[in-house]
Amino acid sequence: APQALGSIINGFALPLKDEHKQFLSRALIPLHKPSGSCIQQYHQQLSYCITQYLEKDPKLADVILRGLVKYWPHTNSQKEVMFLNELEELLELTQSAEFAKVAEPLFRLIARCINSPHFQVAERALFLWNNEYIVSLIAKSREVILPVLYPALEANTTKHWNSTVHGLTFNVQKLFMDMDGRLWEECTKRHKENVDRASAAQQARKQKWEQLEKSVGVTVR
């Protein structure tokens, strides 16, 4: 049973043997893959086993977090909330050097969660900024994280239907502004340039279609 396994992992001697690390990467991490109804039965115990590994050897954060990203349940909101809970627990045990290695793919994923139409997923992802230790990790890797996250935060302020998500998004934006005003301005400028470029390209495509339709004598209704 996973409970007993947690106690066994707790008893592993340091430094961890290669076969113990292989058990983590080949057996435990892939247990995140099964469907929501199946994983619900053992997720808490699985999460406990993995945190035991991370407490033993903080350098395993990279392989563990990348594993979570790999098996992320993009189409199951209930399972996503479960994974976000686990992610917060893992990040609390992650050191900044290991966090920096995985910051970009991790926050590309979190950006998608922030924009989720399922408000529980968006809300749970934005709650990560309520954790002071996680905010301290983000601050150290902000040059990588904010450019990835900025478009998602901006989209929420105009497009997300849920008012709680709006409020939490504004809080996160304010936090980044206070953290590094110069970086925030840079990201704002870059985002506006990207939006303008996309809009100009869309307009050019529309004009081309209109010209083409005129030339073949079709009117657009």
Image (cartoon, helix red, strand yellow):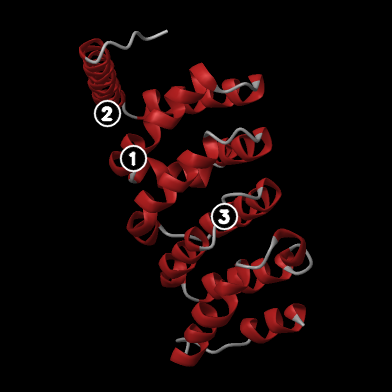
**In the image: residue 8, left or right of residue 97:** right
How far is mark 2 from mark 3, CA to CA? 26 Å
Q: Going 76% across and 62% down the picture, which residue do you hit?
A: 40
Q: Quadrant of the C terminus?
A: top left
| Circle 1 residue | 142
Circle 3 is placed at which residue position? 87
Query: Tag 3, which secondary structure?
Result: helix
At x 45%, y 86%, the residue is 15
Q: Residue at position x 24%, y 13% from top?
A: 207
- Which quadrant of the figure contains the N terminus? bottom right
40 relative position to 172: left or right = right
The extreme front residue here reads 217
- Residue 48: which quarter of the image? bottom right
Which residue, given by chain and number where applicable, does mark 2 sit on? 183
Name the one closer to the observer, 220 or 114: 220
Viewer-proximal residue among 63 and 160: 160
Distance of label 1 from label 3 (alpha carbons):
18 Å
